[in-house]
Image (spheres, grey):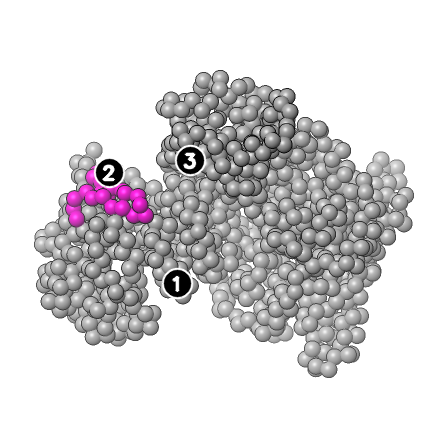
C-alpha cells in the first residue's frame, strides 16, 4: 500500500498578503498589448499570417511593461494592475468600443478603465475593422445558420468573439527539457523540409513562427531576470533581497533550459501558463495533471534535503494566487454567462496513470491544501476518482467540499477512460486524461478539442414546434406543420426531432465557419509548438496540427425537455385532458402568470412582430395596448383559471430527478436526440463532433431568451442546470436524484456532463458525514455518472431560499431522527436553521 | 412468493439518504404509532396510529398510509449501491416500530434475506418476547434511554422507565450491537448528573456506545399543523459548550460517545 503524507501544512503569512494585494482594487483593463499588436501588424501587411502572428507576439513580449509584485516568489504578470487584463482586438472589438464607458459600472465582472486607455483602444481598434476572426466567421456562415444564431437557438459566441484556449499543452516537456529542446526540434524539422514539398511555404512559415515566438518567450523571461536583479540591488530587506536574487537566477535559466529544482519547475510552468493567455484570449487553458508532472521535482528536492514541505506548500500556494492574477474582459452579456471573472484553468489531481495504476502522490494532497489556503476561484480544481482511488484522498477532498468553496469537481475514470477510447484514443492516452475548462475530458498535449464550441438550447426547438418554425415573425426553422393538427404524440415528437435536426445542422455550420476563421486569421505558433504533432506535421493547431481533433458543443435543457415532452404525452395524448391547441394557448399566455416589466417587454415585442408579419400596421397605440395586456395579463379570469389548472396538472406529474424509472428512461431518449445526432458531423480540422451536456451558468442567461415551456416553466426564467433536474423538482433526496441522472447515457456525451448538487452542511457533518459523502460519490460513479460537483449551502443561500422557495424545493435539512424540506418550515424555524448553519452546529 | 412479504403496516414516511440514524447511508421507514408521548418529539405525526391530516404552510396532507413489506422493499432496493459503498442499509423508526411488531419483524427479515444491514431506532417499550423475535434480523439497535428517574420519565414521556431499562439490560445481554441514544432536553435531563447516571447504567449493562442528541425545535410547526400545542415552547436548544461537556461525561464513564446520530 502506498502511504501519503496527509498532514495539512500551515498557510504562510505571505499568502494572505499576496491575496490581499491582488484583491485590493477593481481589476483594470490595459491597452499595452492591443497597441503593440497593432503596431506590429501594420508593419507586416504582406507577410504570411502565421509570421505576422509570431512577430506581433514577439513585439508584445519585448515591449509590454513588466512587474514583480510585492513578496512574489513566482513571477510573470500580463498587466501592471493586479488581476488586470489586456485586450485582443484581432478576435473582435466592436462590443468593447461600445461598452468602454459602462465597463466600470456594470453588474457582472466590472473593470476599471482609464480615459487614456479608452483613447488608446479606440485608436488602435480602428485598424481592426473587417480584419477580425469574427468578421470572417460571419461571412463564412450560411445565412440560415447565422439567423438561427441571431435568434438564440444556440450561441457559439465564445469562439466567435474570442480566442479558443481550451487546451492543455506539454508543460512537462517545457519543464523537463526547456524551450531549447523545442527550438532544436523545430530547427531540425526546418532542415528536413523539402523545398519541393507541396506545403513547403506554409510549413516553413509556421516553423519559423515557432522560432520567433520561443526566442521572444526566452527574452521575456530574461527581462524578469534583469528586473529582479535591479530590484534586489535596491532592496534593503535582506530576506527579500535573497528572494529576488533567486528569482533573477531562476528566470535567467527557465523556461529556456531544463528546470532542476521544484521552484524552477514551478516558474517554468508559470511562464507557459501566463504567456499562452497573452498570445490569444482563449480561456480554459488548463494546467491538467499538475500533481503528476511536478512530483519528480518535488520528490527529488525533498530527498536531497534542499526543500521543506512548508516551502513547497508556500510555492504551490503562490502558483494558485498567480492563476487568479490573470483576467479577461468579456462583453456584458457573456460576462453574465461566465460571471465571476472566471478563466476556468482546470487543474486536476489523482486518478490512474497511463498503466492503469493509481497515480495519487503527496502533491495531490498539497494541491487540495493550496485550494483551501488560497480560497479563490482559480484554479478550477478537480479530482479524478476510480475504483482504486485511495480513501484518504477522497476524504480530504470531501473536507474541501465541506468548506463550501464548490471545489473539487469529481470525475469518474471508470466512465471517462472508456469514453475516450471509444473516440479513438489509445488506452494510455485515455488513462492520462485531464479536464479542460468546466468538465471536458481530453488527453493532454495531443488534443485540439474546441470543447466549448457553443451552447445549444434544447428548449428552443420545442417553441418552434408550437409556432411551425416561426420565431419573432421570421421563419427560422422548418415548417413542421400546424401543431393543432398533431393527433398523436409520435407526430409531435417527430416535429420536435425535425426542428432539432435542422438546428443542429445550423449549429455545425456556424461553428465550422468560426473554425475556418481562426485557421485563416489567428494561427497560434507558440501554443502549437507544445502540442503533438504540430511540429511534425508542420501545421498549427488551428489547421489540424494536433493528433486528436474534436468539436464539442454543449446541449442543455434536458430536464425541461424531458418533463415537457412527458407532460404533453401524458396530458394531451394519453389522458386526453387537454388539447394541444389549448396547451399552445396556455404557453403563449405564460400559463396566465403575471410578468415583470422585463418579461412583458420581451413578449410584447414578440407579439408585435408576429402581428406585423400578418400584415397589421403597428401603431403606438397598438403597442401600448399590447403591452398593457401582456403586463397585466388581461386574459379573462376564466381563461386564467384554465391555464393555471393546466399548470397545476403539469406540476403534479412525476418529474425527472426523482428516480422514476419510466421518466428517467425517457430522459435518456430525449438526450439522444442531441448527442447521437451530433456524432455524425465533422470539423474542418479532420476531427469529429462530440456532444457535451452542460450550460456553465448560461442556463440563466439563455433561459432569459426562452418563452414558457410545456413543463410549466415560466417565460424567461432559468433553464435546468446541467444534467440535473430542473430547480426545485427533485424531492426524493440525493440518492434518488443520482439514480435519475445516471440514467442518461454519459458515455456518448464525451465532451462532458455536469451534475450539480446542493447540500445543507448537516449532510456532511462529522467524520461520518464525510464518509457518507464519499460513499454517495462512489455510488453515483458505480452507476456510471461521469461528473459531480457540490454546492454546500451557506447562510446566504438559505436567505435566498427564504425569498425564492420555488428554487429550493428539494433542499433538505437533516438532523438525527428528523429531516425536513427547508422550504416547508416556518420562517422562525428557518431562522433557527440559518443561525445553526452559521455556527456549523450540526 | 414468500408470505411475509405481504405483511401490511402503516407508515408515515420513507426517507432516503438518511445519514444520522445508524451507520452509512440509510433509508428510514417511519412506522406510525407510539406508546410514549415525549414532549419534545420532533415527529408528533408519528405518535397516533390512526391516519391523520396535518397542515404545514397552508397545505394539508394526509399522514399515514398502509403498505406491504414488498412495496417498502422496492423502495429500499433502489439505494442498494449507496448502502454497499457506505455499509448502510435499512433503519426502522417512528413512532415506535415495536408497535407494529409483525410488520417490523417482516421488514427486517426481508432486508436480511436480501443481504442488507438493518437497524431500528426504538425505545424498547414492548414485551421482551417481541423484541427477542426481531433480534435475529437486526444488526444495530439504537435504543433511547431518556432518564433514570422513573417519575421524571413519566412526567415528560407519559410512561415510566422500568420496562425500558429492563429491556435494555436484556437486549444488551442477548445482542452485542446496542447503542444508547439520549436526547438532551433542557429542563428534563440536560445536566451532568442526569446524563452521567444514564451513561453509568449503560456501562453497567455492557453497552459500549452512547450518542447524545441535542434538542431542537424543528418539529414545532407539526404540532400546530396537527391542531395541538407545543408544550415546551420556552425551551432553548442546549449550547454547544454544554453538549461538549456532556460528551466528556459519557467518555469518562468509559463509553464511546458522540454528539448527534
Please determine whether, in this image, residue B15 is positioned above or below residue A228.
above
Q: Please identify the dominant SS of the magenta region.
A: strand
Residue to which mark 1 is pinned: A835
Measured in 3D between alpha carbons, the distance from the residue under mark 3 to the one under mark 1, in whole angstroms, is 37 Å
Picture disc at residue B70: 2
Please determine whether, in this image, residue A337 is positioned above or below residue B212.
above
Measured in 3D between alpha carbons, the distance from the residue under mark 3 to the one under mark 2, in whole angstroms, is 23 Å
Chain part drawn in magenta: B48-68
Tell me which residue sits at (71%, 29%) in the image: A142
Residue A21 makes an appearance in the image: yes
Q: Chain of mark 2?
A: B
Asked where in the image residue A184 lies, by quadrant, the reply is bottom right
Q: Secondary structure at mark 1?
A: helix
| Observer-nearest of A467 and B130 | A467
In magenta segment, residue B66: yes
For label 1, the crowd category at 10 Å Cα-Cα, with few meaning under 14, some 14 to 19 and many 20 or more, is few
Q: Secondary structure at mark 3?
A: helix
Mark 3 near mark 2, Cβ–Cβ under 8 Å? no
Measured in 3D between alpha carbons, the distance from the residue under mark 2 to the one under mark 1, in whole angstroms, is 42 Å
Picture disc at residue A664: 3
Tell me which residue sits at (81%, 42%) in the image: A129
Circle nearer the N terminus (3, 1): 3
Amino acid at each position: 500500500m502506498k502511504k501519503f503524507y496527509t498532514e495539512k501544512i500551515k498557510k504562510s503569512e505571505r499568502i494572505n498578503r499576496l491575496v490581499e494585494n491582488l484583491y485590493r482594487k477593481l481589476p483594470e483593463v490595459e491597452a499595452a498589448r492591443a497597441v503593440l499588436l497593432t503596431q506590429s501588424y501594420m508593419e507586416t501587411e504582406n507577410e504570411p499570417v502565421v509570421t505576422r502572428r509570431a512577430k506581433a507576439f514577439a513585439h508584445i513580449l519585448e515591449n509590454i511593461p513588466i512587474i514583480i509584485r510585492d513578496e512574489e516568489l513566482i513571477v510573470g504578470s500580463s498587466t501592471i494592475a493586479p488581476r488586470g487584463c489586456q485586450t485582443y482586438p484581432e478576435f473582435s472589438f466592436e462590443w468593447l468600443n461600445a461598452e468602454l464607458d459602462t465597463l466600470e459600472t456594470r453588474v457582472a465582472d466590472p473593470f476599471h478603465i482609464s480615459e487614456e486607455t479608452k483613447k488608446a483602444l479606440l485608436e488602435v481598434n480602428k485598424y481592426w475593422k473587417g480584419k477580425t476572426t469574427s468578421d470572417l466567421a460571419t461571412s463564412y456562415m450560411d445565412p440560415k445558420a447565422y439567423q438561427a444564431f441571431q435568434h438564440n437557438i444556440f450561441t457559439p459566441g465564445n469562439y466567435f468573439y474570442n480566442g479558443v484556449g481550451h487546451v492543455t499543452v506539454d508543460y512537462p516537456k517545457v519543464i523537463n527539457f526547456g524551450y531549447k529542446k523545442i527550438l532544436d526540434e523545430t530547427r531540425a524539422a526546418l532542415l528536413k523540409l523539402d523545398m519541393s514539398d507541396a506545403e513547403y511555404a506554409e510549413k516553413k512559415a509556421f516553423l519559423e513562427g515557432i522560432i520567433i515566438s520561443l526566442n521572444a518567450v526566452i527574452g521575456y523571461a530574461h527581462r524578469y531576470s534583469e528586473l529582479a536583479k535591479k530590484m534586489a540591488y535596491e532592496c534593503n530587506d535582506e530576506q527579500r533581497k535573497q528572494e529576488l536574487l533567486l528569482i533573477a537566477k531562476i528566470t535567467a535559466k527557465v523556461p529556456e533550459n531544463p528546470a532542476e529544482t521544484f521552484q524552477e519547475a514551478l516558474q517554468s510552468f508559470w511562464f507557459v501558463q501566463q504567456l499562452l493567455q497573452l498570445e490569444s484570449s482563449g480561456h480554459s487553458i488548463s494546467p491538467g495533471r499538475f500533481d503528476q508532472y511536478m512530483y519528480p521535482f518535488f520528490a527529488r528536492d525533498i530527498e536531497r534535503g534542499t526543500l521543506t514541505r512548508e516551502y513547497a506548500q508556500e510555492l504551490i500556494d503562490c502558483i494558485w494566487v498567480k492563476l487568479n492574477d490573470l483576467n479577461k474582459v468579456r462583453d456584458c452579456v457573456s460576462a453574465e454567462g461566465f460571471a465571476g471573472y472566471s478563466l476556468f484553468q482546470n487543474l486536476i489531481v489523482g486518478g490512474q496513470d497511463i498503466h492503469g495504476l493509481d497515480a495519487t502522490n503527496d502533491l495531490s494532497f498539497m494541491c487540495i491544501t493550496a485550494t483551501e489556503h488560497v480560497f479563490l476561484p482559480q484554479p478550477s480544481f478537480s479530482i479524478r476518482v476510480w475504483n482504486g482511488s485511495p480513501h484518504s484522498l477522497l476524504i480530504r477532498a470531501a473536507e474541501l467540499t465541506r468548506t463550501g468553496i464548490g471545489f473539487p469537481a469529481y470525475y469518474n475514470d471508470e466512465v471517462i477512460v472508456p469514453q475516450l477510447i471509444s473516440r479513438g484514443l489509445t488506452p494510455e492516452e485515455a488513462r492520462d486524461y485531464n479536464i479542460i475548462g468546466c468538465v471536458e475530458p481530453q488527453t493532454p498535449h495531443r488534443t485540439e478539442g474546441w470543447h466549448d464550441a457553443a451552447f445549444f438550447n434544447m428548449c428552443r426547438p420545442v417553441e418552434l414546434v408550437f409556432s411551425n418554425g416561426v420565431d419573432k415573425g421570421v421563419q427560422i426553422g422548418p415548417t413542421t406543420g400546424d401543431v393543432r393538427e398533431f393527433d398523436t404524440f409520435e407526430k409531435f415528437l417527430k416535429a420536435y426531432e425535425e426542428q432539432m435536426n435542422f438546428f443542429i445542422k445550423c449549429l455545425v455550420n456556424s461553428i465550422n465557419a468560426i473554425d475556418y476563421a481562426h485557421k485563416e486569421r489567428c494561427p497560434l505558433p507558440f501554443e502549437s509548438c507544445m502540442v503533438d504533432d504540430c511540429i511534425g506535421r508542420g501545421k498549427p493547431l488551428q489547421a489540424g496540427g494536433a493528433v486528436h481533433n474534436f468539436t464539442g458543443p454543449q446541449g442543455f435543457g434536458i430536464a425541461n425537455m424531458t418533463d415537457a415532452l412527458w407532460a404533453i404525452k401524458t396530458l394531451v395524448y394519453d389522458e386526453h385532458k387537454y388539447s394541444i391547441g389549448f396547451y399552445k394557448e396556455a404557453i403563449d399566455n405564460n400559463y396566465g402568470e403575471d410578468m415583470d416589466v422585463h418579461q412583458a417587454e420581451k413578449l410584447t415585442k414578440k407579439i408585435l412582430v408576429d402581428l406585423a408579419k400578418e400584415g397589421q400596421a403597428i401603431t403606438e397605440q397598438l403597442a401600448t395596448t399590447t403591452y398593457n395586456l401582456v403586463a397585466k395579463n388581461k386574459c379573462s379570469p376564466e381563461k386564467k383559471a384554465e391555464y393555471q389548472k393546466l399548470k397545476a396538472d403539469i406540476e403534479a406529474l412525476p418529474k425527472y430527478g426523482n428516480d422514476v424509472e419510466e421518466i428517467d428512461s425517457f430522459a435518456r431518449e430525449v438526450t439522444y436526440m442531441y448527442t447521437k445526432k451530433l456524432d455524425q458531423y465533422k470539423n474542418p480540422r479532420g476531427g469529429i463532433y462530440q456532444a457535451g451536456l452542460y450550460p456553465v451558468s448560461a442556463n440563466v442567461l439563455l433561459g432569459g431568451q426562452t418563452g414558457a415551456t410545456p413543463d410549466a416553466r415560466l417565460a424567461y426564467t432559468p433553464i435546468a442546470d446541467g444534467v440535473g433536474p430542473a430547480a426545485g423538482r427533485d424531492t426524493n433526496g440525493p440518492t434518488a436524484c443520482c439514480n435519475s441522472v445516471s440514467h442518461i447515457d454519459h458515455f456518448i456525451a464525451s465532451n462532458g456532463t455536469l451534475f450539480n448538487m446542493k447540500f445543507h452542511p448537516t449532510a456532511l457533518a462529522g467524520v461520518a458525514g464525510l464518509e457518507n459523502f464519499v460513499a454517495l460519490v462512489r455510488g453515483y460513479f458505480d452507476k456510471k455518472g461521469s461528473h459531480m460537483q457540490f454546492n454546500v449551502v451557506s447562510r446566504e443561500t438559505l436567505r435566498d431560499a427564504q425569498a425564492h422557495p420555488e428554487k429550493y424545493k428539494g433542499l433538505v435539512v437533516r438532523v438525527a431522527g428528523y429531516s425536513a424540506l427547508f422550504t416547508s418550515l416556518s420562517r422562525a424555524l428557518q431562522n433557527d436553521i440559518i443561525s445553526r448553519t452559521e455556527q456549523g452546529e450540526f | 412468493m414468500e408470505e411475509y412479504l405481504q405483511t401490511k403496516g402503516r407508515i408515515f414516511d420513507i426517507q432516503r439518504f438518511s445519514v444520522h440514524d445508524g451507520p452509512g447511508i440509510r433509508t428510514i421507514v417511519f412506522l406510525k404509532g407510539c406508546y410514549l408521548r415525549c414532549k419534545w418529539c420532533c415527529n408528533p405525526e408519528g405518535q397516533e396510529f390512526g391516519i391523520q391530516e396535518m397542515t404545514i404552510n397552508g397545505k394539508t396532507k394526509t399522514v399515514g398510509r398502509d403498505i406491504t413489506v414488498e412495496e417498502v422493499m422496492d423502495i429500499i432496493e433502489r439505494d442498494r449501491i449507496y448502502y454497499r459503498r457506505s455499509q448502510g442499509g435499512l433503519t426502522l423508526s417512528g413512532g415506535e416500530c415495536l408497535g407494529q411488531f409483525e410488520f417490523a419483524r417482516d421488514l427486517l427479515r426481508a432486508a436480511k434475506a436480501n443481504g442488507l444491514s438493518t437497524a431500528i431506532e426504538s425505545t424498547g417499550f414492548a414485551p421482551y418476547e417481541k423484541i427477542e423475535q426481531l433480534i435475529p434480523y437486526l444488526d444495530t439497535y439504537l435504543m433511547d434511554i431518556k432518564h433514570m428517574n422513573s417519575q421524571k420519565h413519566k412526567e415528560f414521556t407519559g410512561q415510566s422507565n422500568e420496562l425500558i431499562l429492563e429491556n435494555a439490560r436484556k437486549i444488551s445481554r442477548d445482542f452485542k450491537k446496542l447503542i444508547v441514544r439520549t436526547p438532551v432536553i433542557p429542563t428534563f435531563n440536560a445536566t451532568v448528573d442526569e446524563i452521567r447516571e444514564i451513561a453509568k447504567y449503560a456501562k453497567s449493562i455492557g453497552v459500549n456506545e452512547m450518542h447524545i442528541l441535542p434538542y431542537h425545535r424543528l418539529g414545532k410547526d407539526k404540532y400546530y399543523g396537527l391542531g395541538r400545542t407545543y408544550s415546551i415552547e420556552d425551551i432553548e436548544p442546549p449550547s454547544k459548550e454544554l453538549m461538549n461537556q456532556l460528551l466528556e461525561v459519557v467518555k469518562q464513564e468509559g463509553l464511546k460517545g458522540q454528539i448527534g446520530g
